[in-house]
Image (spheres, rainbow, N blue to C red):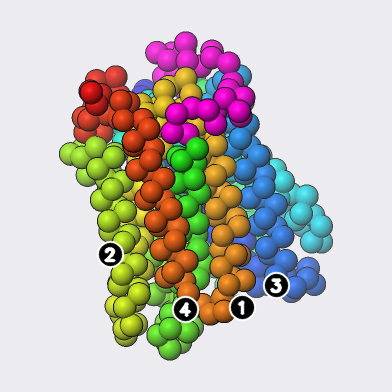
């Protein structure tokens, strides 16, 4: 039965990734039909991000009141309803309204599932589950492309994904007894009162941890959005070639997380985070070197591979480093910090690129890399007594602590 629940959680992570690529895939046609400028996609995405941040911050309260399973099921259902609403929308303002439950649902799934897996499963599953998010994000553009090439329109693409989400939500609702059974060993922590935000910030090492998440997401999302433009300007290659090269950054993260799941059997989360940071630095150095396009391409792929272990391993360490009672609150704010970085930093670089040059991308990325590195080491220093020394394959309760 435990294996069945894990399979359902894997499906839930795929569902989390499914909507993420839809707007970008469909917007070139959607904005024409709605009669709005192409830039209005930013309005929709910002509202979605705002809802995601809000639900992440409230995840501690909701999960302790309702349980991770119910929060996940309801959140997926909210996303499904919003996607269905998108499929029947005829005016832009309808997208604005529907973006609210869209974002709230996405944030609820993310925070609840990440904490549940960190508490109940080993680090390899955390990496593989985040790899499943990449699978979901990769599937949806193909679904949208299928709908567009068959002449059924972007509406049909949203409709198909919404039906998949409704089915996944139904599966999670049916599996609620399994979630409760799995939660029973830590029921005493589930009954703990939700932490006020001020109390969360007072946890030793919490603030630098949140800044590290913000910096990591700023680096990752800015690279995803601007790598192609950088190669067009810096390497003087065609937009089509640059787009195909830049997509490999995303593939690097997905493949890297699949490989990282195996590495967690041998190495600790902390070791893998540092190894990932070292690989990111190598990638940034390659991007800095004046070169032909292939070397810049290798640099972006290397950065993607380095990013792979950082996010899931930091999340998985949270219960052992900050305490199981605090983990849901911590992970909720971690998710919110990450979404703030994703929401605001790529547009900020856009302003820098417009005012100065897109060639400053490596400098921008290096700044956030160094910020992430410093903040992570500060977390390690402040929580040294709580750092697990065993490899991530052991149960958290069996991990030895630093002296």
The image shows residue 263, relative to residue 345, as above or below, that is: above
Marks 3/4: CA–CA distance: 24 Å
Q: Which residue is mark 2?
A: 282
Q: Residues within 10 Å of mark 2 (few under 14, many from 20)?
A: some
Which quarter of the figure is the C terminus placed in? top left
Looking at this view, name the residue that lies furthest to the top: 188
Circle 3 or circle 4, nearest the eye? 4
Q: Which residue is mark 3?
A: 38
In percent of the image, x 43 and y 33: which residue is there? 205
Task: Please tell me whether the stretch drawn in magenta is mainly helix, strand or loop.
Answer: helix
In percent of the image, x 43 and y 53: which residue is there? 371
Marks 2/1: CA–CA distance: 28 Å
* Residues at circles 1 and 3 in contact by the CB criterion of under 8 Å: no
**Left or right: where 128 falls relative to 103:** left
From the viewer's side, name the closer residue of 309 and 37: 309
In percent of the image, x 55 and y 55: which residue is there? 342
Marks 1/4: CA–CA distance: 12 Å
Marks 3/2: CA–CA distance: 36 Å
Q: Which residues are magenta?
A: 178-206
User: Is residue 147 at least partly visible in the picture?
Assistant: no
Q: Which residue is mark 1?
A: 355
Q: Earlier in the sequence, mark 3 or mark 2?
A: 3
């Amino acid at each position: 039965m435990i294996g069945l629940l894990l399979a359902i959680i894997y499906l839930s992570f795929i569902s989390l990734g499914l909507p993420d690529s839809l707007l970008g895939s469909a917007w070139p046609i959607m904005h024409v039909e709605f009669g709005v400028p192409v830039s209005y996609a930013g309005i929709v995405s910002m509202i979605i991000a705002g809802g995601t941040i809000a639900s992440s911050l409230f995840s501690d309260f909701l999960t302790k009141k309702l349980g991770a399973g119910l929060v996940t099921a309801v959140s997926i259902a909210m996303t499904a309803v919003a996607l269905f609403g998108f499929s029947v929308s005829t005016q832009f303002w309808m997208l604005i309204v529907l973006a609210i439950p869209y974002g709230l649902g996405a944030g609820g799934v993310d925070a609840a599932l990440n904490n549940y897996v960190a508490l109940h499963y080993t680090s390899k599953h955390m990496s593989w589950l985040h790899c499943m998010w990449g699978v979901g994000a990769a599937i949806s553009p193909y679904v949208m492309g299928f709908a567009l090439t068959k002449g059924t329109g972007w509406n049909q693409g949203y409709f198909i994904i919404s039906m998949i989400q409704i089915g996944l939500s139904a599966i999670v609702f049916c599996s609620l007894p399994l979630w409760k059974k799995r939660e029973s060993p830590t029921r005493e922590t589930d009954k703990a009162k939700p932490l006020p935000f001020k109390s969360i910030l007072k946890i030793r090492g919490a603030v630098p941890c949140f800044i590290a998440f913000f910096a990591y997401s700023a680096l990752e999302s800015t690279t995803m959005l601007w790598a192609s433009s950088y190669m067009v300007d810096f390497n003087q290659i065609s937009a089509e070639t640059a787009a195909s090269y830049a997509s490999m950054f995303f593939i690097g993260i997905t493949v890297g997380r699949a490989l990282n799941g195996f590495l967690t059997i041998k190495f600790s989360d902390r070791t893998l985070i540092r190894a990932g940071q070292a690989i990111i630095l190598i990638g940034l150095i390659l991007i800095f070197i004046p070169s032909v396009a292939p070397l810049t391409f290798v640099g972006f792929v290397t950065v993607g591979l380095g990013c792979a272990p950082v996010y899931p391993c930091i999340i998985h360490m949270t219960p052992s480093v900050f305490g199981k009672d605090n983990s849901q609150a911590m992970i909720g704010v971690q998710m919110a910090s990450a979404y703030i970085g994703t929401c605001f930093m790529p547009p900020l670089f856009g302003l820098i690129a417009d005012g100065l040059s897109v060639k400053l991308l490596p400098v921008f990325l290096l700044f956030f890399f160094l910020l992430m590195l410093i903040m992570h080491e500060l977390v390690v220093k402040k929580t040294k007594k709580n750092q697990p020394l065993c490899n991530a394959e052991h149960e958290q309760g069996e991990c030895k602590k630093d002296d």
